[in-house]
Image (tube, rainbow, N blue to C red):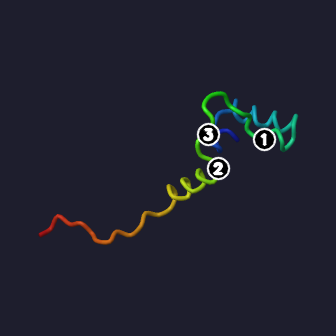
Amino acid sequence: MCAAHLGTTETTVRKWRDRFATRGIRGLVDLPRPGRPEIYGPEVRLRVVACATSAPPEPDHVASSQR
């Protein structure tokens, strides 16, 4: 039920619940991942998300096919 509500799998919910049970709040910090390091930090990601989830600007003019 929790997984469906969060839009994830039961395996993922179980993993994070177990991390919290064994390590407390510190267990909820995502572990480092292999591969290329991040290029952009959290501030840039927050700005991108804010931009992507905001309402589009009002157009300066309305294009019309009527003449």
In this view, the mark in front (1 or 2) = 2
- Which residue lies under the disc numbered 1? 28
Drawn side of residue 6 relative to residue 26, left or right: left
Residue in the foreground of this view, choosing between 62 and 48 = 48
Residue at (52%, 57%) from the top-left corner?
53
Disc on the earlier residue, 1 or 2: 1
Q: Amino acid at mark 1?
A: Leu
- Which residue lies under the disc numbered 2? 42
Label 2 CA crowd tier, 10 Å (few <14, some 14–19, many 20+): few
Residue at (63%, 35%) from the top-left corner?
37
CA gap between label 1 and label 2 equals: 17 Å
Label placed on residue 38: 3
Q: Residue furthest left?
A: 67
Q: Is residue 60 above or below residue 17?
A: below
CA gap between label 3 and label 2 equals: 10 Å
- Callout 3: helix, strand or loop? loop
Residue in the foreground of this view, choosing between 7 and 1 = 7
Discs 1, 3 touching: Cβ within 8 Å? no
Q: Position of residue 24 (x, y in %)?
A: 87, 41
CA gap between label 1 and label 3 equals: 20 Å
Q: Position of residue 59 (x, y in %)?
A: 34, 68
Q: Quadrant of residue 35?
A: top right
Q: Is residue 30 above or below residue 56?
A: above
Q: Position of residue 46 (x, y in %)?
A: 60, 54
Name the quarter where the C terminus is drawn.
bottom left
Label 3 CA crowd tier, 10 Å (few <14, some 14–19, many 20+): few
In this view, the mark in front (1 or 3) = 3
Drawn side of residue 32 relative to residue 47, left or right: right
Drawn side of residue 63 relative to residue 25, left or right: left
Label placed on residue 62: none
Q: Amino acid at mark 2?
A: Pro
